[in-house]
Image (cartoon, helix red, strand yellow):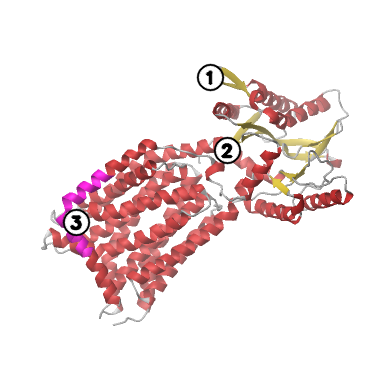
Amino acid sequence: MRNLINIRITYFFQQLGYFIADFYRQCLLITIILTIILSIGVKNFDEVSSVRDYFISDNAPSKAELSVARSFFDDQGLPFHLMIAFEAADGGDLLRKEHLDKAMEIEHFLQYNLSIEQKGKKFAYSDFCGNHCQTSDIVNTFLTMYKSSKYGLNKHVKFSYPSMDLFGHHVYLANNILRVGLRKNSIIQESRLIVINFRATYSNPTISKVLDKWEKAVLDYTLTTRNDSLVHAYAASEGLLSIEFQKTSRKAMPLFPLSYFAILIFTVATCCKLNKTKSKHWEAFFGVLCPVLSLCSSFGLLFWFGAKFLSIITVVPFLILAIGVDDACIFLHAWQIADSQKSARDKLGHAMAEAGPAMTITSLTNLISFTVGMFSSTPAIRAFCLFTTIAVLFDYLYQIFFFTKDSPLMDFLRILKNVVFVESGQMAIFVNNPGNLSNPDTLAKIMIGIDKIGRLEACYEEKVECVQKFIMMTGFKGAISWTKRLWMLQNWRAIATEYHDLNLTLYEDFSIYADQLLTIPPSTYQTVICAILSMAAVLCVFTPRLKIVVPGVFSVISINLGVFGLLYYWDIDMDPISMAAILMAIGYSVDNIAHITYHYYKTEGNQDVKEQMQQALSSIAWPLLQANLSTILGVLALCVIRSYMVQVFIKVAVLVVVLGLIHALVVLPVVFAALPVRN
C-alpha cells in the first residue's frame, strides 16, 4: 500500500513535469495573461479600518449591548467618542493654580474654540455634540468650582471622591478626575490626571467628515502641548486608532520591494556556481518572481469580487513571499540534482517527481490552516485568512506551471492602561422591562439585583442611590488587564441573566475589546487542533508510517507551544492581530517538519539509520536553510516600523523559523535515529 501511494504520487508529478515541458510556452503565456487580467481588479481597491466593525467578533455580547444603549437614548446614528487626558509636565498635581489655569484654558479651547471647516461652514464641538454635550461639562464644572473654592471666596464646596454633591446633585468624578490624593473623609487634595470625554452621534456623511476632521485637529493640537512647560494633553479615539492602522499599512507596503530584492539577491547568490552549466541563477530569479505573480493574481481576484483591504492584510505579501521562496528552494534543489545528461523534458519530470509531493504537503497544510481561520467570527481574521488562502493557492499553481513603536497614540494608551483602567470605569445598567413599579415587590427585586452588582469586588464602595430613566450607573476600578475586565463583565452579565424577567442590559465603553477574549482564544485553539489534525492526515497520505507521522505531529505541537509561551512572556495579548500571527505560525511551522519527514520517508529501504539520515539531510537541509534565511531577510525590512501589529508578526516569524529549523534539522533526526529501521 505504501509503495503504491508513493508510486502514484510520484508518477502524477512526473507526468505533470512532462506535460509542462511539452507545452511550456502555453503554460507561460496562460500564467502571464491570467496574472494581467486578474491584476486589473486592483482598480476596485478599497481600504477599511474601523476597529469596531472589523476587529470585534460578530457575535460579541457588547455589540448587542451597544444596540440596546443606543435604542434607549433614541440615538439615530453611530457613536463617536474621543478622550483627552491631561498630565502636568512635571508629573505633579494638576490642581496647582498655574496648572489649573492652563488645563482650563486647554479644556475651553477644545470645547468651544477649536473648529474645522466643511463645505464653507465652521464646526466646533458644540455644533455637533447634540444630546452628549453634558458629558464633557463635568471637568469644566469641577475645575471651575475647585478654583473658586481653593483660590477664590467660595469655601463651602466639599470635593468628596469618587462622587461629590453639587447643589443637591450627585456628580460622579472617578471617570474624569484620576490619580487623586485624598485628605480625611475622602476629600480631594490633588489630582495628577484629568480625562475629558467628548461624545457625539452621526447619521450622515457630512457630520462623519466633520468628526474625522475635528478629531485630527484635536490630535494635532494636543501634539503642540508636548513642549508646554505646564500641561501636556493626549488624545485617542477609534477613528484615530483606525488612522494609525492605515499609517502602518502605508509604511509597510513600500518596504515590500526591499524585502523582495533582499530575498532575490540572497536566493540568486546561493544558486550561483562557478560552473556556468550548473549555475541556476536564472531559475532562482523566476522562482522568486512566482510569489509576486501570485500576490497580483490573488489580490486582484479578491478586489474584483469587492473584498475590502484591512491593515492586518499588510503582512500577507511578506508571508506569501516566505512561503513561495520555500517552494522555490525545494524545486531548485530538485532541479539541481537532476541528471545533467538528461534532456530538459526528463530533468523537469524528475524534478517535479522529487519536489512536487513536498510542495503539495506544505501548500495543503497551509491552505487548511488558513481556511479554518476563514470561519472565524472576527471579520479581520476572516479577511486575513481569505487573502492568504487564495494567495497560497495561486503561489502553489504558479510555482508548478510558471517556474518551471512611533505612534502619537502610544502615550495615551500608556495612560489608559496604567491609570484609567486601574482607577476608573463606569457601567450603565438598563432596566428594559421594569414591570409595575407601584408594586413594592417589583422595586425590591430591582434593588436586590442592582445591589448584587454594586457589591462585586471591583465596584467602588458607594451605595447606588439614584435611578434616572431606569439607568443605574455604578463605578468600578482595578481592571488593569483585559482578562480582569472580561471577568468583571461576565460576572455582571451573569447577574443580569439571573434577573431575566427585568431584561437587564449592561453597557461599558471598552467591553467590545474585552469581548475579544471570549472568541479569539477558542478560535485559536480550534485552529491549532485543526491544523495538527490536517497535517497528520496529509502526512498519513504522503508518508504512511506511524513512526514518521507521530514525531512530525508532536514537532508541530512543540513549535507552536514554544511560540505561544514566548508570546506570553513578551506580554502579547490574545487579539485579532496576535491570532492572525498565530495562524501564520501554525501554517509555517508545518513546512520544515513536512519537508524533513517526507524526505526521510523516501529513504526507507535497506540502508541503516545513518545512511537514511545522511540521504534525507543531504536532500533537504540546504534548501531548508535557504528558505528560512530568506524569510528572516524578508521580515528584517519591517523592523524599522514601530507598530504593534508589525512587531508581533516579526517576532512570530523569527520564532517559527528558529524553532522550525531546530526541530527539522536536530530534534527529528535524533528521534528518527533512535527508532528502529524497517527493512
Left or right: 409 as drawn, with respect to 5: right
For label 2, the crowd category at 10 Å Cα-Cα, with few meaning under 14, some 14 to 19 and many 20 or more, is some
Q: Which quadrant holds residue 656?
A: bottom left
Magenta portion: prevailing SS class: helix
Q: Residue at x 43, y 45 (%)?
A: 313
Local secondary structure at mark 1: loop
Local secondary structure at mark 3: helix
Q: Is residue 174 visible?
A: yes
Image quarter in which the N terminus is found: bottom left
Of the pair 11 and 159, the residue shown nearer to us: 11
From which residue to which does the magenta span run? Answer: 13-34
For label 1, the crowd category at 10 Å Cα-Cα, with few meaning under 14, some 14 to 19 and many 20 or more, is few
Left or right: 114 as drawn, with respect to 499: left
Q: Which residue is mark 2?
A: 238
For the residue marked with disc 3, what is the amino acid? Answer: Ile
Q: Spot the residue most to the front.
A: 436
Query: Would residue 21 be counted in the magenta stretch?
Result: yes
Q: Closer to us: mark 3 or mark 2?
A: 3
For the residue marked with disc 2, what is the amino acid? Answer: Glu
Image quarter in which the C terminus is found: bottom left
Q: Is residue 100 above or below residue 533?
A: above
Q: Which residue is mark 3?
A: 20
Q: Which mark is residue 665?
A: none
Residue 600: x and y in percent read: 31, 71
Q: Which mark is residue 119?
A: 1
Query: Would residue 319 be counted in the magenta stretch?
Result: no
Local secondary structure at mark 2: helix
Residue 248: x and y in percent read: 46, 39
Nearest to N terminus: mark 2 or mark 1: 1
Q: Spot the residue most to the top.
A: 120
